Amino acid sequence: MSSTVYDLLAGTAADRPDAPFLVFAGDDGTGTVSYAEQVRRADETAGLLAALGVGPGARVHLMTPNRPEFLDVWFACARLGAVVVPVNPLSTADEVAHQLTDSRAVLSVVDDTLRATVAAAAGERTVLGLEELVARRGGTPPPPVVADAELAAIMFTSGTTSAPKGVQVTHANYRRVGELVADHLRVTADDRWLITLPLFHGNAQYYCLASALVAGGSVAVAARFSATGWPAQARDLRPTLASLFAAPIRMVLARSTPSPSDADNALRLVLFAQNLAPAQAQEFETRFGAPLIQLYGMTETVVPPFMNPLDDRRRWDSIGLPLPGIEVRVVGEEGEPGELQVRGRPGIDVTSGYDGRPEATAALFDDGWLRTGDQVRLDDIGRAFFVDRAKDMMKRAGENVAASEVEQVLAAHPAVLEAAVHGVPDPVYDEAIVAHVVLAPGAHAEPDELIAWCAERLSKFKVPETVVLREELPRSTIGKILKNALRDEVLAR
């Protein structure tokens, strides 16, 4: 059995060297890299990194947008037994300083446009630009390591409530998530993933890359997500599978012009995370001719604990049923939403913890159960429904209010494209509820109208006191709404 993600790549390259591995859609056009060519690129990159002192256990900071070189470094580190530390290319110098120090990186590989940001924080560390990497790579790398249970990557959390922590991901983790996702979605060598989300994120690595490697399939990677360009990519790059979040799906529906050719694609399913309004899900499926499969996962869980089945139990509003081998429980009062906790083998099914943070790791686990911090409810067949992040639950006049419930009601208004809801301190009622709303293109609605809409559909204590109309919502690079930024903006007023 293959030991590392490099071995997965090399195994297919040995059996089918000319099989496509990567189709990259960049600003200068589209190019294809075979399995054998990807191995060669990884080996040459490993030769350079080894010459720069990178060996087993060394941490390599990697900060680049979606580019083929990201994968070259990813596989090269796997061959060397090094640990790749992929980070958000929008990171500031202060954030980079934290990443480098916290991960104990010995070297940073960076897109040349971002080199100044990294150099400002790198100190004595080597900073290697991608142009230099391509020009200098080569030489004979050391033999591939055998490192099944060893660290493959450190993936930083978003750090919305505390300093970002490095999640430990082993080679066994990657193989396990790849096997389970490939088995559940019936991924074969004939399948191709469309990856428009950032490669540094767990979604692209866990669900798309790992399952493609396990099955010997291919990936089509776009340089960046484009709401107007996604329909053409879904058609022209000939993917059979794609993965998105709810927000990018809404953007595709709102900003791209429908065409009769939209359904002229090879897609057989599209994964998504986070809630969609039923009308949006129906519109997407009708337009693109592919079913939407909702799942739930975190960087820390690695394997998605829940995923919708590919049969008539599939529901748009549910995160699905537990995957095989993953234990789940909901901690709270019986019949009420509670915290989702997950139990699996650390370093295989779930992370073994936060790198260099024993106290944070101890807090993550409760007697072997990984605490997600997310509120869910289960139906009578064990199907799960996401309620909200614990931190997004609001307390209004002594009652608990899920921000997601208010957001779903607002999203059902015909003029609303999307909404984000949060609480702010209130001296009388615990918290006041504030809704930020983006209207659909060409639509019109006043705040009072939207408050009245909620009042007709929600209990009085769940109705927003304030609705703020906005052109757009602040987002992370994977489309998650930055509620902390919204809350700080309101409080600053």
Image (cartoon, rainbow, N blue to C red):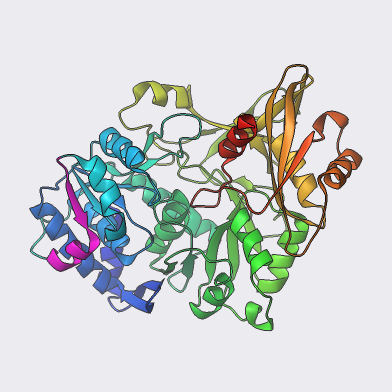
In which quarter of the view is residue 59 placed? top left
Is 325 placed left or right of 294 in the picture? left
Report the label total: 0
Percent from the top left, x then y, of residue 351? 40, 37
The single residue placed furthest to the front in the displayed view is 493
Which region shows up in magenta?
124-137
Residue farthest toward the right in the current orientation of the protein:
456
Q: Does residue 351 belong to the magenta stretch?
A: no
Q: Residue at x 18, y 62 (%)?
A: 133
In what quadrant of the picture does the N terminus appear? bottom left
* Residue 226 image position (x, y, % from top left): 53, 66
Would residue 310 be found to the left or right of residue 60 on screen?
right
In the rendered view, tell whether residue 144 sits above or below residue 291.
above
Where, by quadrant of the figure, is residue 125 drawn?
top left
| Position in image of residue 172 (x %, y %) | 34, 46
Q: Is residue 337 left or right of residue 213?
A: right
Question: Is 16 drawn above or below residue 7 in the view shown?
Answer: below
The quadrant of the image that shows the C terminus is top right
Image position, residue 344 (x, y; %): 46, 36
Identify the residue at the far top of this view: 428
Residue 376 appears in the figure: yes
Q: Nearer the viewer, residue 300 or 398?
A: 398
* Residue 62 drawn above or below residue 149: below
Q: Residue, x 55% and y 73% (percent of image)?
A: 234
User: Which one is nearer the viewer's eye here, 484 or 220?
Assistant: 484
Q: Is residue 339 visible?
A: no
Identify which residue is drawn at 42% across, 66% down.
Answer: 223
Please report the residue visible at 71 percent of the width from the left and 60 percent of the height from the top. Answer: 281
